[in-house]
Image: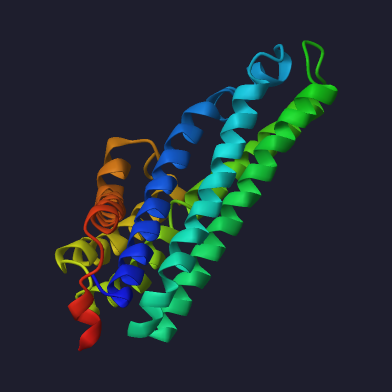
Amino acid sequence: MSTPDRQLRRVALWGGLAYLATFVFSIPAVALLVPATDHVRTFMTGGDSDDMRVIAGGVSEMLNAFACVATALVLHPVTSRVSRTLALGFVASRLLEAAIIMVGVVSILTVVTLRQDLGGAAAPAGVIATAHALVAVRSWTFLFGPGVMPAFNALFLGTILYRSGLVPRVLPLIGLVGAPLLVLKSLIVAFGAMGDASAGAALMALPIAAWELGLALWLTFRGFRAAALAH
């Protein structure tokens, strides 16, 4: 394997691992945050047994944000060779997604601090109301961060990969088809016509999840098609 081929393989490997990291960190975070996101009053008026669990969930989401940015930065040396504009768009989209996620992280960790300082069995109604507001902020960031931005990520990166043939075109095609479905799902959820945890929402988000996981596995174990960059 020549030096350029090794470099291309290295970029693909690290890009694939970064994509896998987004799954590793984002999926457990949802379960870890349940005491604060789904049972706000109980969390605010109870003991501190769930504090570390929620903090771990916040840290996991923070690491997910870092992994999101890493996917774009690591792949940029290759994607920019196909289209500098689309490659820069992918970086910007991932940075915006990470920023939205971080707003949610700060909100949910603030709930923990609020519980530790002012919570307990005698927590004032105003404190609980504030906690509900902070959880609502996190809910909206979850909808517009992981819920919308992956569609734009797919449009930028999917177009690059489909045009270039760096990976089998069926992979980016799944992402390009799934992008409008994900946006539509998020709009339906935003207007209250469907729950974000409903079966319908999961079905509409499935193509984007399949695209990202499929790409992660392909890049990790197979890499880019070097011949595609020779054209």
Foreground of the two, 157 or 117: 157
Residue 136 is situated, as x and y percent measured from the top left of the image, at 61, 40
From the viewer's perspective, is residue 144 above or below residue 127?
below
Foreground of the two, 167 or 139: 167
Q: Quadrant of residue 36?
A: top right
Residue 130 is situated, as x and y percent measured from the top left of the image, at 75, 35
**Camera sees residue 36:** no
Residue ID at (39%, 43%): 23
State how many labels appear: 0
Foreground of the two, 207 or 16: 16
Query: Which image quarter holds the N terminus?
Result: bottom left
Residue 62 vs residue 48: left or right? Answer: left
Foreground of the two, 198 or 215: 215
Residue ID at (72%, 29%): 112
Query: Which image quarter holds the C terminus?
Result: bottom left
Residue ID at (62%, 46%): 104
Residue 227 is situated, as x and y percent measured from the top left of the image, at 18, 79
Residue 159 vs residue 196: left or right? Answer: left
**Camera sees residue 117:** yes
Q: Quadrant of residue 78?
A: bottom left
Residue ID at (44%, 45%): 192
From the viewer's perspective, is residue 217 above or below residue 59?
below
Q: Residue furthest bottom?
A: 231
Q: How is the image coloured?
A: rainbow
Residue 19 is situated, as x and y percent measured from the top left of the image, at 39, 53
